Amino acid sequence: MSIYQKKSICPYDCPSACGLLITTDGKRVLKVDGDPEHPASLGVLCRKMRRYEEDVHSPERILTPLKRTGPKGSGAFAPISWEEAVSRITDRWQTLIRTYGPETIAYCYYSGVMSSIQRHCCEALFHRMGACELVKTLCSSAKGAGYVSVVGNTGCLDPRELKDSDLYLVWGSQMIATRLPALKTLTNGKKSEKKIIQIEVYGEPMAGYCDETILIRPGADGALALAMMQVLVQEGLADEAYLRENGNGYDEFRKTLPPCTPEWAEPITGVPAETIRRLARLYGNAKAPAIILGSGNSRHRNGGMTVRLITILSLFTGAWKHPGGGLCGAAPFSGSYIDNTRIQRPDFRKTPARRININQLASALNETPLRSLYVCGANPANSVSDQKAILKGLAREDLFTVVHERFLTDTARFADIILPASFSVEQSDCYTAYGYCTLAAAPKIIDPPKEARSNWDTVKLLAAGMGYEDAYFKRTEEEMLERILKKETPASACLSDADRDMLIKGAAFSMPCSDRRTFHTENGRFFFINPTLEEAVPRYLPFEEELPLRLVSVPSACTLNTVFQFNGRLEPENGPLTLILNPEDAAERDIREGDRILAYNDLAEVEFYAHISPRIAKGAAASVGTRGISQSLNGLTANALHHARLSDLGEATTMNDNGIEVRRVHLPQP
Ligand SMILES: Nc1nc2c(c(=O)[nH]1)N[C@H]1C(S)=C(S)[C@@H](COP(=O)(O)OP(=O)(O)OC[C@H]3O[C@@H](n4cnc5c(=O)[nH]c(N)nc54)[C@H](O)[C@@H]3O)O[C@H]1N2
Ligand SMILES: Nc1nc2c(c(=O)[nH]1)N[C@H]1C(S)=C(S)[C@@H](COP(=O)(O)OP(=O)(O)OC[C@H]3O[C@@H](n4cnc5c(=O)[nH]c(N)nc54)[C@H](O)[C@@H]3O)O[C@H]1N2
Ligand code: SF4
Ligand SMILES: [Mo]
């Protein structure tokens, strides 16, 4: 039996979409290494993916279609054939459509698999059906909308340029967990004395990589950006000629700055005025400072505004003129290498239907008009706000739920029918990265085990069961890939035919970043003042104080959303559900390290163990990693404390914008 290596791509929701080298005998994955030839990851492989083969061949995988045999949520299922599963599903959908109309059916997909075809293909089926339409804003759409409202479709700082920056502000990004390859570029820079400063709510994991940690109260970053700009103007460090020449409304915006002094910002942000002044000077005196912007501070009710202000700050000293200067991590550059609408097929929809924002799935699931839900590449019971209401909705006997999954997740437990899903190495697809300029393809390496099927093959079967004759639903996975990469990808025009042939066989290409030397807006200038917005003039939007502590979610290096919950190796490293508190906040409540505590608000009560750290901002509480209900202490996780409210721009999640109070749990003595 011959053993050989094939190139693949990490399928998970991570900015770098790292390259993988898969060692296989053609039947099984034997080993996984980082691909040193991958243009972004350069051989880096995070600890989560180092033994991917154990996940691919996990004994816990679902390998046949299943039908529910016990109460919803109980996890009792019995195997059925694909034929039976498809006819049960499509019979029910046809009856619902005939009796109540197609808007009684909804789907939910998000970021389980980030390759283009497998991720987006189920949408074509539901557009064709006329089902409710999903608004997919669970992650960073407030960040995108805030950025675009300032600079339009101008590309942001290409991470390949970070080597040329002379100062790094890591602003709300837990890079050690989420941007490992980019962190490597920064720390190489550190050897040449370039300062790395993090502006964080919870600075513990990144502290060792940074020269300074500035702790900030959640949701207050807009005030910090304004105060920095006030200092820059006052001390002559703003590049005013550049701002007047390239921006719309600089003088009007400038007039709003005088009251925004560091002393004004101190009580809002919790950052001492002197620290703000020093940070502004350091930033203003750098030639090519880079702000690496994560998504944490955009997941607030004022998140779009915060990102607007930080984007304006990134322009304020003229940094964008220099290689390495500007804002990294925000621009929608990668989506354009592939035209996703060729996969999602919005043209299949004949009339507009009810739109369901994924963040508000909880209320939608509890409304009777909804009678069926299809989940694929998502785990809403564990990833969406208002978990108690999500679980209540999923438990509805009259909600016919189908989940296409690899494992018995918290969501799959509530399914009427579970369909077995394949892993990335068992399907063919192409990938872009949302944090790098790469385009890659990864053909299937091994066959799926037993009855497992890819998302595309499942969508095809369901479309056939519905009687849809469209040629689109008859294409093979390989035909889909060939079309997407060879015919329907306008923005990758820079690739030659030979490049495309190579790509399809399994390769990753470094692509051009969208141009950021000219502003891609109507009049070629960026917007200080944006008259199309309700808040035309940017300002700090204060947040509402409900309860004294503000809960934020922090990714951990051993979790990635919910996808590694079935990985026996990583799970013990995560330990029990923990809530991180500042020593002063803990002392005020008589809470000590390791105490069992209850976090609560109007939505729910969730139990955690307390971890007390001086590296979290006073007034904040952090929950680390997205943990499963089976790992929880009282049947709920942090998501039960998240309201379904949306951000000011981008209809996005506000999961970092929730007030809570915390108290010690008095356990009965044994
Ligand atoms: N508490 C808390 N909640 C959060 C976050 C947080 O940090 N903390 N983060 C938020 C963010 S930023 C995001 S993007 C969302 C993510 O939210 P989701 O997308 O709902 O969560 P994932 O864990 O990515 O769910 C992916 C599921 O897809 C399955 N899957 C993987 N590959 C495939 C495949 O090829 N086919 C099929 N059918 N299934 C597959 C996996 O087994 C997994 O169960 O969560 C949000 N929710
Ligand atoms: N290992 C690992 N990798 C991941 C993920 C994961 O869960 N684990 N998730 C993936 C996903 S879905 C995404 S979207 C990306 C996200 O990657 P990034 O966009 O780079 O963002 P995060 O690393 O999630 O960092 C968010 C940080 O914001 C901080 N924060 C929260 N509120 C505020 C605030 O108001 N102000 C400031 N200054 N900071 C705040 C949090 O403490 C957290 O450290 O990472 C992806 N990669
Ligand atoms: S860092 Fe992210 S993209 Fe890279 S291997 Fe790990 S999970 Fe995958
Ligand atoms: Mo995300």
Image: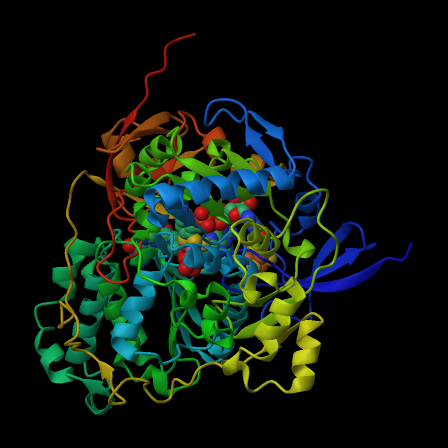
- Position of 542 with respect to 641 (left or right) is left
47 relative to 579 in the view: left or right? right
The spot of residue 546 in percent (x, y) is: 16, 41
Q: Is residue 192 visible?
A: yes
- Outermost residue on the right side: it is 1
Vertical arrangement, residue 616 with respect to residue 322, above or below: above
Q: Quadrant of the N terminus?
A: bottom right
Give the total number of marks visible in the rendering. 0
- Residue 24: image x %, image y %? 80, 55
- For the point 25% across and 60% down, the residue is 221
Q: Residue at x 37, y 53 (%)?
A: 138
Q: Image point 51% across, 82% down: which residue?
A: 490
Residue occupying the point 72% across, 42% down:
450
In this rendering, the answer to whether 19 lies above or below 497 is above
In the image, residue 19 sits, relative to residue 338, either above or below, namely above
**Residue 468 to residue 248: above or below:** above
Answer yes or no: is residue 655 visible. Answer: no
Q: Quadrant of ligand 2?
A: bottom left
Q: Nearer the viewer, residue 668 or 479?
A: 479
Which of the pair 472/220 is nearer the observer?
A: 472
The answer to which quarter of the image holds residue 568 is top right
User: In the displayed structure, does residue 15 sit left or right of residue 637?
Assistant: right
Q: Position of residue 172 (x, y in %)?
A: 36, 58
